[in-house]
Image (spheres, coloured by chain):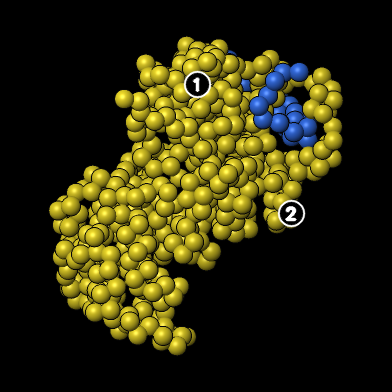
Chain colours: A yellow, B blue
Amino acid sequence: MKTKTISLGASFRDPSGFLFTRGGVLYRQVNQDYADDYTRLMESGLYEKLVKAGLIIPHTESEAQPADEKRSFKVLCPERVPFISYPYEWSFGQLKDAALATLSIQKRALKLGMSLKDASAYNIQFHRGKPTLIDTLSFETCKEGEPWVAYRQFCQHFLAPLALMAYRDVRLNQLLRVYIDGVPLDLASQLLPGRTRWNLGLSTHIHLHASAQKRYVDVAVTEARGGRKMSKDALLGLIESLRATVRKLEWKPAGTEWADYYAANNYTDFAFEHKKVLVGDWLLRISPKTIWDLGANAGIFSRVAAETGAYVISSDIDPAAVELNYRQVKESNEQNLLPLVLDLTNPSPSIGWQNRERDSFLQRGPVDAVLALALVHHLAISNNVPLERVAEFFAVCGEWLIVEFVPKSDSQVQKLLRNRVDIFSEYTRTGFESAFGQWYTIQSSSAVRDSERWLYLMKRK
Amino acid sequence: MIWLYLDPGSGSFLVQLLIASIAGLVIFVAASWRKIKRLFNKNKVQNDESDDEDEDD
Protein backbone atom coordinates (compact mmCIF):
# COMPACT_ATOMS: atom_id res chain seq x y z
CA MET A 1 0.00 0.00 0.00
CA LYS A 2 1.35 3.44 -0.88
CA THR A 3 0.89 6.18 1.69
CA LYS A 4 0.25 9.65 0.38
CA THR A 5 3.12 12.14 0.46
CA ILE A 6 2.11 15.75 1.03
CA SER A 7 4.49 18.70 0.60
CA LEU A 8 3.86 21.48 3.11
CA GLY A 9 2.49 24.80 1.85
CA ALA A 10 5.04 26.99 3.63
CA SER A 11 8.06 25.02 2.53
CA PHE A 12 9.07 26.10 -0.94
CA ARG A 13 11.31 29.17 -0.78
CA ASP A 14 14.59 27.61 0.15
CA PRO A 15 16.09 25.29 -2.47
CA SER A 16 18.04 23.48 0.28
CA GLY A 17 15.15 21.17 1.00
CA PHE A 18 11.52 21.03 2.07
CA LEU A 19 9.06 19.51 4.50
CA PHE A 20 6.59 16.79 3.73
CA THR A 21 4.33 14.47 5.64
CA ARG A 22 3.66 10.83 4.98
CA GLY A 23 1.34 8.68 7.02
CA GLY A 24 1.05 11.46 9.59
CA VAL A 25 4.83 11.64 10.12
CA LEU A 26 6.72 14.86 9.40
CA TYR A 27 9.92 14.64 7.32
CA ARG A 28 12.40 17.12 5.99
CA GLN A 29 14.16 16.32 2.74
CA VAL A 30 17.69 17.71 2.43
CA ASN A 31 18.58 18.32 -1.21
CA GLN A 32 21.92 17.48 -2.86
CA ASP A 33 22.60 21.21 -3.24
CA TYR A 34 22.72 21.51 0.51
CA ALA A 35 24.82 18.40 1.22
CA ASP A 36 28.03 20.28 2.15
CA ASP A 37 26.34 22.75 4.47
CA TYR A 38 24.32 20.03 6.17
CA THR A 39 27.42 17.93 6.72
CA ARG A 40 29.24 20.91 8.14
CA LEU A 41 26.34 21.72 10.50
CA MET A 42 26.44 18.18 11.86
CA GLU A 43 30.21 17.70 11.93
CA SER A 44 31.32 21.10 13.23
CA GLY A 45 29.56 20.45 16.53
CA LEU A 46 27.20 23.37 15.91
CA TYR A 47 24.10 21.18 15.73
CA GLU A 48 24.96 19.42 18.95
CA LYS A 49 25.68 22.67 20.72
CA LEU A 50 22.39 24.21 19.60
CA VAL A 51 20.41 21.13 20.62
CA LYS A 52 22.04 21.20 24.02
CA ALA A 53 21.09 24.85 24.44
CA GLY A 54 17.52 24.08 23.32
CA LEU A 55 17.92 26.47 20.40
CA ILE A 56 17.27 24.08 17.50
CA ILE A 57 14.75 21.34 16.99
CA PRO A 58 16.41 17.90 17.30
CA HIS A 59 16.07 15.47 14.41
CA THR A 60 17.10 11.97 13.46
CA GLU A 61 18.26 10.89 10.04
CA SER A 62 15.63 8.65 8.53
CA GLU A 63 15.57 5.76 6.09
CA ALA A 64 12.21 6.97 4.76
CA GLN A 65 11.90 7.39 1.04
CA PRO A 66 12.49 10.98 -0.12
CA ALA A 67 9.60 12.93 -1.63
CA ASP A 68 11.79 14.06 -4.53
CA GLU A 69 14.23 11.22 -5.09
CA LYS A 70 16.31 12.89 -7.79
CA ARG A 71 17.38 15.86 -5.67
CA SER A 72 17.55 14.15 -2.33
CA PHE A 73 20.65 13.91 -0.18
CA LYS A 74 19.04 12.85 3.10
CA VAL A 75 15.69 12.60 4.80
CA LEU A 76 15.36 13.90 8.35
CA CYS A 77 12.70 13.19 10.89
CA PRO A 78 12.46 16.29 13.14
CA GLU A 79 10.93 16.28 16.59
CA ARG A 80 7.45 17.62 16.18
CA VAL A 81 6.33 20.96 17.62
CA PRO A 82 2.83 20.41 19.05
CA PHE A 83 1.43 23.70 17.77
CA ILE A 84 2.75 26.05 15.09
CA SER A 85 2.22 29.69 16.06
CA TYR A 86 3.02 32.88 14.22
CA PRO A 87 4.69 36.15 15.25
CA TYR A 88 1.44 38.10 14.92
CA GLU A 89 0.07 35.83 17.65
CA TRP A 90 2.94 36.42 20.04
CA SER A 91 3.13 38.88 22.89
CA PHE A 92 5.92 41.42 23.07
CA GLY A 93 8.06 39.20 25.29
CA GLN A 94 7.64 36.21 23.01
CA LEU A 95 8.75 38.15 19.94
CA LYS A 96 11.64 39.62 21.88
CA ASP A 97 12.81 36.21 23.10
CA ALA A 98 12.48 34.81 19.59
CA ALA A 99 14.68 37.68 18.34
CA LEU A 100 17.30 37.07 21.01
CA ALA A 101 17.27 33.34 20.29
CA THR A 102 17.91 34.06 16.60
CA LEU A 103 20.88 36.29 17.48
CA SER A 104 22.20 33.76 19.93
CA ILE A 105 22.06 31.06 17.24
CA GLN A 106 23.83 33.33 14.76
CA LYS A 107 26.59 34.09 17.25
CA ARG A 108 27.21 30.42 17.95
CA ALA A 109 27.14 29.69 14.23
CA LEU A 110 29.71 32.41 13.47
CA LYS A 111 32.05 30.99 16.07
CA LEU A 112 32.00 27.66 14.22
CA GLY A 113 32.35 29.10 10.74
CA MET A 114 28.69 29.03 9.77
CA SER A 115 26.00 31.68 9.42
CA LEU A 116 22.21 31.89 9.27
CA LYS A 117 21.13 32.45 5.69
CA ASP A 118 17.72 33.60 6.81
CA ALA A 119 16.37 35.17 9.97
CA SER A 120 12.66 34.64 9.52
CA ALA A 121 10.47 34.87 12.60
CA TYR A 122 8.48 31.97 11.14
CA ASN A 123 11.51 29.73 11.58
CA ILE A 124 11.19 30.14 15.34
CA GLN A 125 8.59 28.17 17.28
CA PHE A 126 7.90 27.85 20.96
CA HIS A 127 8.91 24.32 21.86
CA ARG A 128 8.81 23.17 25.48
CA GLY A 129 8.16 26.78 26.39
CA LYS A 130 11.24 28.21 24.67
CA PRO A 131 11.91 29.83 21.29
CA THR A 132 13.51 27.18 19.07
CA LEU A 133 14.75 27.22 15.47
CA ILE A 134 12.74 24.68 13.50
CA ASP A 135 14.47 25.08 10.15
CA THR A 136 17.51 22.82 10.26
CA LEU A 137 18.53 23.99 6.78
CA SER A 138 18.97 27.65 7.74
CA PHE A 139 22.76 27.49 7.96
CA GLU A 140 25.45 28.05 5.40
CA THR A 141 29.20 27.98 5.56
CA CYS A 142 30.58 31.45 6.28
CA LYS A 143 32.12 33.04 3.26
CA GLU A 144 35.23 34.99 4.06
CA GLY A 145 34.62 38.74 4.08
CA GLU A 146 30.88 38.48 3.32
CA PRO A 147 28.28 40.42 5.34
CA TRP A 148 25.29 38.78 7.03
CA VAL A 149 22.83 38.08 4.26
CA ALA A 150 19.84 37.87 6.62
CA TYR A 151 20.45 41.24 8.30
CA ARG A 152 17.61 43.00 6.48
CA GLN A 153 15.23 40.15 7.22
CA PHE A 154 16.12 40.22 10.90
CA CYS A 155 15.35 43.94 11.07
CA GLN A 156 12.02 43.48 9.29
CA HIS A 157 10.84 40.38 11.14
CA PHE A 158 12.01 41.27 14.63
CA LEU A 159 13.54 44.67 15.28
CA ALA A 160 10.98 46.83 13.46
CA PRO A 161 7.86 45.24 15.02
CA LEU A 162 9.48 45.16 18.47
CA ALA A 163 10.45 48.83 18.26
CA LEU A 164 6.95 49.76 17.09
CA MET A 165 5.40 47.76 19.93
CA ALA A 166 7.69 49.30 22.53
CA TYR A 167 7.67 52.90 21.30
CA ARG A 168 4.31 53.31 19.57
CA ASP A 169 1.65 50.73 20.34
CA VAL A 170 1.81 47.08 21.26
CA ARG A 171 -0.96 46.26 18.76
CA LEU A 172 1.33 47.13 15.87
CA ASN A 173 2.65 43.56 15.82
CA GLN A 174 -0.49 43.02 13.75
CA LEU A 175 1.40 44.60 10.84
CA LEU A 176 3.11 41.22 10.54
CA ARG A 177 -0.21 39.78 9.48
CA VAL A 178 -0.21 42.10 6.47
CA TYR A 179 3.50 42.04 5.66
CA ILE A 180 4.49 38.41 5.55
CA ASP A 181 8.20 39.21 5.09
CA GLY A 182 8.25 41.56 8.06
CA VAL A 183 7.50 45.25 8.50
CA PRO A 184 9.02 47.34 5.68
CA LEU A 185 11.68 49.53 7.24
CA ASP A 186 10.54 52.75 5.59
CA LEU A 187 7.11 52.19 7.14
CA ALA A 188 8.60 51.42 10.54
CA SER A 189 10.82 54.50 10.31
CA GLN A 190 7.80 56.70 9.59
CA LEU A 191 5.65 55.22 12.33
CA LEU A 192 8.27 55.34 15.07
CA PRO A 193 8.33 58.48 17.22
CA GLY A 194 11.09 61.00 16.46
CA ARG A 195 12.79 60.37 19.79
CA THR A 196 13.85 56.90 18.57
CA ARG A 197 16.45 58.71 16.45
CA TRP A 198 18.31 59.35 19.70
CA ASN A 199 18.50 55.62 20.32
CA LEU A 200 21.73 54.60 18.62
CA GLY A 201 20.53 51.10 17.72
CA LEU A 202 17.20 52.18 16.29
CA SER A 203 18.62 55.21 14.53
CA THR A 204 21.03 53.00 12.62
CA HIS A 205 19.28 49.62 12.22
CA ILE A 206 15.90 51.17 11.37
CA HIS A 207 16.10 54.84 10.37
CA LEU A 208 19.47 54.93 8.61
CA HIS A 209 18.79 51.48 7.21
CA ALA A 210 15.49 52.67 5.71
CA SER A 211 17.06 55.70 4.05
CA ALA A 212 19.97 53.65 2.71
CA GLN A 213 17.49 51.21 1.16
CA LYS A 214 15.75 54.06 -0.56
CA ARG A 215 18.96 55.66 -1.75
CA TYR A 216 20.54 52.49 -3.13
CA VAL A 217 17.40 50.90 -4.48
CA ASP A 218 18.74 50.76 -8.04
CA VAL A 219 22.33 49.90 -7.23
CA ALA A 220 23.59 46.31 -7.36
CA VAL A 221 25.10 44.94 -4.17
CA THR A 222 28.56 44.42 -5.70
CA GLU A 223 28.60 47.99 -6.94
CA ALA A 224 27.36 49.43 -3.65
CA ARG A 225 29.95 47.73 -1.49
CA GLY A 226 32.87 48.42 -3.84
CA GLY A 227 34.97 45.48 -2.69
CA ARG A 228 34.69 46.21 1.05
CA LYS A 229 34.94 43.14 3.23
CA MET A 230 33.64 42.22 6.62
CA SER A 231 35.86 40.67 9.23
CA LYS A 232 34.63 38.09 11.70
CA ASP A 233 34.90 40.66 14.49
CA ALA A 234 32.71 42.97 12.46
CA LEU A 235 30.10 40.23 12.01
CA LEU A 236 30.14 39.51 15.73
CA GLY A 237 29.98 43.26 16.40
CA LEU A 238 26.85 43.52 14.28
CA ILE A 239 25.19 40.75 16.29
CA GLU A 240 26.19 42.45 19.55
CA SER A 241 24.80 45.74 18.35
CA LEU A 242 21.49 44.12 17.37
CA ARG A 243 21.37 42.24 20.63
CA ALA A 244 21.92 45.35 22.72
CA THR A 245 19.23 47.18 20.73
CA VAL A 246 16.68 44.37 21.16
CA ARG A 247 17.48 43.91 24.84
CA LYS A 248 16.82 47.56 25.60
CA LEU A 249 13.31 47.42 24.16
CA GLU A 250 10.72 47.01 26.90
CA TRP A 251 6.98 47.09 27.08
CA LYS A 252 4.40 47.13 29.85
CA PRO A 253 0.72 48.12 29.77
CA ALA A 254 0.37 51.90 29.82
CA GLY A 255 -0.28 53.44 33.21
CA THR A 256 -0.17 50.18 35.13
CA GLU A 257 2.34 48.08 36.94
CA TRP A 258 2.40 44.37 36.35
CA ALA A 259 1.46 43.82 39.96
CA ASP A 260 -1.74 45.90 39.61
CA TYR A 261 -2.60 44.06 36.51
CA TYR A 262 -2.16 40.76 38.17
CA ALA A 263 -4.23 41.74 41.20
CA ALA A 264 -7.09 42.95 39.00
CA ASN A 265 -7.20 39.63 37.25
CA ASN A 266 -6.53 37.37 40.11
CA TYR A 267 -9.67 36.15 41.83
CA THR A 268 -9.43 34.59 45.23
CA ASP A 269 -13.04 34.07 46.13
CA PHE A 270 -14.96 30.89 46.72
CA ALA A 271 -16.60 30.88 43.33
CA PHE A 272 -13.27 31.00 41.63
CA GLU A 273 -11.84 28.15 43.64
CA HIS A 274 -14.94 26.08 42.99
CA LYS A 275 -14.57 26.72 39.26
CA LYS A 276 -11.00 25.44 39.43
CA VAL A 277 -12.10 22.24 41.14
CA LEU A 278 -14.89 21.60 38.62
CA VAL A 279 -12.63 22.22 35.62
CA GLY A 280 -9.87 20.05 37.07
CA ASP A 281 -12.22 17.15 37.84
CA TRP A 282 -13.89 17.20 34.46
CA LEU A 283 -10.58 17.34 32.62
CA LEU A 284 -9.35 14.32 34.56
CA ARG A 285 -12.52 12.54 33.54
CA ILE A 286 -12.10 13.15 29.81
CA SER A 287 -8.26 13.29 29.83
CA PRO A 288 -7.71 15.31 26.65
CA LYS A 289 -4.24 15.46 25.09
CA THR A 290 -4.71 18.86 23.50
CA ILE A 291 -6.68 21.80 24.86
CA TRP A 292 -7.50 25.29 23.63
CA ASP A 293 -8.28 27.63 26.49
CA LEU A 294 -10.04 30.45 24.64
CA GLY A 295 -10.24 33.81 26.39
CA ALA A 296 -7.75 32.53 28.91
CA ASN A 297 -6.78 35.89 30.40
CA ALA A 298 -3.44 35.36 32.17
CA GLY A 299 -3.89 31.59 32.07
CA ILE A 300 -5.03 30.52 35.52
CA PHE A 301 -7.35 27.81 34.18
CA SER A 302 -4.86 26.93 31.46
CA ARG A 303 -2.55 25.93 34.28
CA VAL A 304 -5.21 23.77 35.87
CA ALA A 305 -5.50 22.14 32.42
CA ALA A 306 -1.74 21.85 31.88
CA GLU A 307 -1.39 20.05 35.20
CA THR A 308 -3.39 17.16 33.74
CA GLY A 309 -0.51 16.70 31.29
CA ALA A 310 -2.33 18.05 28.24
CA TYR A 311 -0.73 20.50 25.80
CA VAL A 312 -2.58 23.79 26.26
CA ILE A 313 -2.92 26.79 23.96
CA SER A 314 -3.85 29.68 26.23
CA SER A 315 -5.23 32.48 24.08
CA ASP A 316 -6.55 35.92 24.85
CA ILE A 317 -7.29 39.12 22.96
CA ASP A 318 -5.46 41.27 25.54
CA PRO A 319 -1.72 41.57 24.81
CA ALA A 320 -1.05 42.47 28.45
CA ALA A 321 -2.73 39.32 29.75
CA VAL A 322 -0.77 37.23 27.26
CA GLU A 323 2.47 38.94 28.22
CA LEU A 324 1.83 38.18 31.86
CA ASN A 325 0.95 34.61 30.97
CA TYR A 326 4.19 34.20 29.01
CA ARG A 327 6.26 35.65 31.86
CA GLN A 328 4.84 32.98 34.10
CA VAL A 329 5.67 30.27 31.57
CA LYS A 330 9.27 31.45 31.66
CA GLU A 331 9.43 31.87 35.37
CA SER A 332 8.08 28.39 36.13
CA ASN A 333 9.69 26.77 33.09
CA GLU A 334 6.31 25.46 31.93
CA GLN A 335 6.73 23.24 28.90
CA ASN A 336 3.21 22.38 27.78
CA LEU A 337 1.50 25.75 27.83
CA LEU A 338 1.65 28.29 25.01
CA PRO A 339 0.11 31.75 25.50
CA LEU A 340 -1.06 33.46 22.30
CA VAL A 341 -2.73 36.74 21.38
CA LEU A 342 -5.90 35.92 19.50
CA ASP A 343 -9.06 37.83 18.67
CA LEU A 344 -11.75 35.17 18.47
CA THR A 345 -14.08 37.47 16.54
CA ASN A 346 -11.42 37.54 13.81
CA PRO A 347 -8.99 34.66 14.37
CA SER A 348 -5.75 34.44 12.34
CA PRO A 349 -6.56 33.80 8.68
CA SER A 350 -4.51 31.65 6.32
CA ILE A 351 -2.06 33.94 4.56
CA GLY A 352 0.83 34.01 2.12
CA TRP A 353 1.35 32.38 -1.25
CA GLN A 354 -1.87 30.77 -2.47
CA ASN A 355 -3.17 31.42 1.05
CA ARG A 356 -1.26 28.32 2.06
CA GLU A 357 1.92 29.51 3.73
CA ARG A 358 0.55 30.21 7.20
CA ASP A 359 -2.44 28.27 8.39
CA SER A 360 -5.50 29.89 9.85
CA PHE A 361 -6.15 29.33 13.52
CA LEU A 362 -8.91 26.81 12.86
CA GLN A 363 -6.77 24.87 10.37
CA ARG A 364 -4.38 24.23 13.23
CA GLY A 365 -7.11 22.38 15.10
CA PRO A 366 -9.19 20.58 16.05
CA VAL A 367 -8.20 19.76 19.61
CA ASP A 368 -9.60 17.28 22.09
CA ALA A 369 -11.12 19.85 24.41
CA VAL A 370 -12.01 23.53 24.48
CA LEU A 371 -12.24 25.69 27.59
CA ALA A 372 -14.53 28.69 27.26
CA LEU A 373 -14.71 30.27 30.69
CA ALA A 374 -16.27 33.69 31.17
CA LEU A 375 -16.18 34.04 27.40
CA VAL A 376 -19.61 33.40 25.90
CA HIS A 377 -21.10 36.72 27.06
CA HIS A 378 -18.32 38.60 25.28
CA LEU A 379 -18.98 36.82 22.00
CA ALA A 380 -22.79 36.79 22.30
CA ILE A 381 -23.30 40.30 23.63
CA SER A 382 -20.30 42.45 22.66
CA ASN A 383 -20.00 40.87 19.23
CA ASN A 384 -23.70 40.04 18.68
CA VAL A 385 -23.06 36.40 17.75
CA PRO A 386 -26.19 34.23 18.20
CA LEU A 387 -25.64 31.56 20.85
CA GLU A 388 -26.02 28.63 18.46
CA ARG A 389 -23.26 30.08 16.30
CA VAL A 390 -21.01 30.47 19.30
CA ALA A 391 -21.70 26.77 19.97
CA GLU A 392 -20.95 25.91 16.33
CA PHE A 393 -17.59 27.68 16.53
CA PHE A 394 -16.59 25.74 19.65
CA ALA A 395 -17.77 22.51 18.03
CA VAL A 396 -15.42 23.14 15.09
CA CYS A 397 -12.56 23.69 17.55
CA GLY A 398 -12.87 20.48 19.53
CA GLU A 399 -14.84 17.47 20.64
CA TRP A 400 -15.23 18.32 24.31
CA LEU A 401 -16.25 21.64 25.75
CA ILE A 402 -16.12 23.09 29.22
CA VAL A 403 -18.14 26.26 29.06
CA GLU A 404 -19.36 28.83 31.53
CA PHE A 405 -22.70 30.57 31.35
CA VAL A 406 -22.73 34.01 32.96
CA PRO A 407 -26.33 35.28 33.32
CA LYS A 408 -27.52 38.80 32.57
CA SER A 409 -27.81 39.59 36.24
CA ASP A 410 -24.01 39.23 36.65
CA SER A 411 -22.17 42.52 36.98
CA GLN A 412 -19.81 41.62 34.11
CA VAL A 413 -22.72 41.19 31.72
CA GLN A 414 -24.44 44.28 33.06
CA LYS A 415 -21.30 46.20 32.18
CA LEU A 416 -21.51 44.98 28.58
CA LEU A 417 -25.19 45.95 28.38
CA ARG A 418 -24.72 49.35 30.00
CA ASN A 419 -24.92 51.35 26.78
CA ARG A 420 -26.89 48.89 24.71
CA VAL A 421 -30.50 48.13 23.96
CA ASP A 422 -31.01 44.62 25.29
CA ILE A 423 -31.75 42.71 22.08
CA PHE A 424 -30.65 39.44 23.63
CA SER A 425 -33.92 37.87 24.68
CA GLU A 426 -32.46 34.38 24.08
CA TYR A 427 -29.63 35.04 26.47
CA THR A 428 -30.96 32.99 29.39
CA ARG A 429 -29.79 29.72 30.85
CA THR A 430 -32.60 27.86 29.07
CA GLY A 431 -31.82 29.64 25.81
CA PHE A 432 -28.13 28.82 26.24
CA GLU A 433 -28.80 25.12 26.89
CA SER A 434 -31.08 24.79 23.90
CA ALA A 435 -28.69 26.66 21.57
CA PHE A 436 -25.71 24.56 22.65
CA GLY A 437 -27.93 21.46 22.58
CA GLN A 438 -27.97 21.73 18.79
CA TRP A 439 -24.28 20.86 18.70
CA TYR A 440 -23.54 19.18 21.99
CA THR A 441 -24.93 16.80 24.56
CA ILE A 442 -24.58 18.06 28.08
CA GLN A 443 -22.60 15.53 30.12
CA SER A 444 -22.45 17.40 33.42
CA SER A 445 -23.46 20.76 34.76
CA SER A 446 -23.03 22.55 38.02
CA ALA A 447 -23.87 25.89 39.52
CA VAL A 448 -20.72 27.70 40.56
CA ARG A 449 -20.81 28.18 44.32
CA ASP A 450 -21.45 31.70 45.62
CA SER A 451 -22.42 32.99 42.19
CA GLU A 452 -25.15 32.90 39.59
CA ARG A 453 -22.85 31.34 37.05
CA TRP A 454 -23.09 27.81 35.65
CA LEU A 455 -20.44 25.48 34.34
CA TYR A 456 -21.09 22.75 31.77
CA LEU A 457 -19.21 19.78 30.42
CA MET A 458 -20.40 19.01 26.92
CA LYS A 459 -19.56 16.49 24.21
CA ARG A 460 -19.96 17.22 20.52
CA LYS A 461 -22.83 15.35 18.84
CA MET B 1 29.05 36.72 -7.47
CA ILE B 2 28.14 34.32 -4.75
CA TRP B 3 24.71 32.82 -5.14
CA LEU B 4 22.28 33.94 -2.42
CA TYR B 5 18.73 32.81 -1.95
CA LEU B 6 17.59 36.02 -0.26
CA ASP B 7 18.25 39.40 -1.82
CA PRO B 8 20.23 41.11 0.92
CA GLY B 9 19.50 44.58 -0.51
CA SER B 10 22.24 47.06 -1.41
CA GLY B 11 21.24 49.65 1.20
CA SER B 12 21.08 46.95 3.88
CA PHE B 13 24.57 45.80 2.89
CA LEU B 14 26.04 49.26 3.25
CA VAL B 15 24.40 50.05 6.57
CA GLN B 16 25.53 46.71 7.86
CA LEU B 17 29.11 47.35 6.78
CA LEU B 18 29.08 50.70 8.52
CA ILE B 19 27.60 49.48 11.82
CA ALA B 20 29.58 46.26 11.82
CA SER B 21 32.91 47.93 11.24
CA ILE B 22 32.35 50.26 14.19
CA ALA B 23 30.92 47.52 16.42
CA GLY B 24 33.68 45.16 15.33
CA LEU B 25 36.25 47.73 16.31
CA VAL B 26 34.60 48.10 19.72
CA ILE B 27 34.76 44.34 20.20
CA PHE B 28 38.40 44.27 19.15
CA VAL B 29 39.33 47.11 21.50
CA ALA B 30 37.32 45.61 24.38
CA ALA B 31 39.01 42.24 23.89
CA SER B 32 42.45 43.84 23.78
CA TRP B 33 41.64 45.91 26.86
CA ARG B 34 40.59 42.77 28.73
CA LYS B 35 43.86 41.13 27.77
CA ILE B 36 45.82 44.11 29.05
CA LYS B 37 43.80 44.18 32.27
CA ARG B 38 44.37 40.49 32.76
CA LEU B 39 48.11 41.05 32.56
CA PHE B 40 47.94 43.41 35.52
CA ASN B 41 45.30 41.65 37.64
CA LYS B 42 46.20 38.05 37.27
CA ASN B 43 44.58 37.09 40.54
CA LYS B 44 41.37 38.97 40.13
CA VAL B 45 38.32 36.99 39.05
CA GLN B 46 37.23 37.96 35.57
CA ASN B 47 33.54 38.63 35.52
CA ASP B 48 33.17 41.23 32.85
CA GLU B 49 32.23 38.70 30.21
CA SER B 50 28.74 38.52 31.60
CA ASP B 51 27.07 37.32 28.41
CA ASP B 52 27.65 33.77 29.46
CA GLU B 53 24.58 32.40 27.68
CA ASP B 54 26.58 32.37 24.51
CA GLU B 55 29.80 31.15 25.93
CA ASP B 56 30.94 27.70 25.09
CA ASP B 57 30.11 25.02 27.59
Figure quadrant of residue B29? top right
Query: Gap between marks 1 and 2, in whole Å?
Result: 45 Å
Residues tagged by mark 1 and mark 2 found on one chain of the structure: yes
Q: Position of residue A268 (x, y in %)?
A: 25, 67
Q: Quadrant of the C terminus of chain A?
A: bottom left
* Residue that label 1 marks: A68
Chain assignment, label 2: A
What residue appears at the point 84 percent right and 22 percent down from the top-left corner? A226
Query: Foreground: A363 or A84?
Result: A363
* Residue that label 2 marks: A190
Q: Quadrant of the N terminus of chain A?
A: top left
Query: Foreground: A116 or A53?
Result: A116
Q: Position of residue A374 (x, y in %)?
A: 32, 68
The amino acid type found where label 1 is placed reads: Asp
What residue appears at the point 30 percent right and 84 percent down from the top-left corner? A409
In the image: residue A217, left or right of residue A347: right
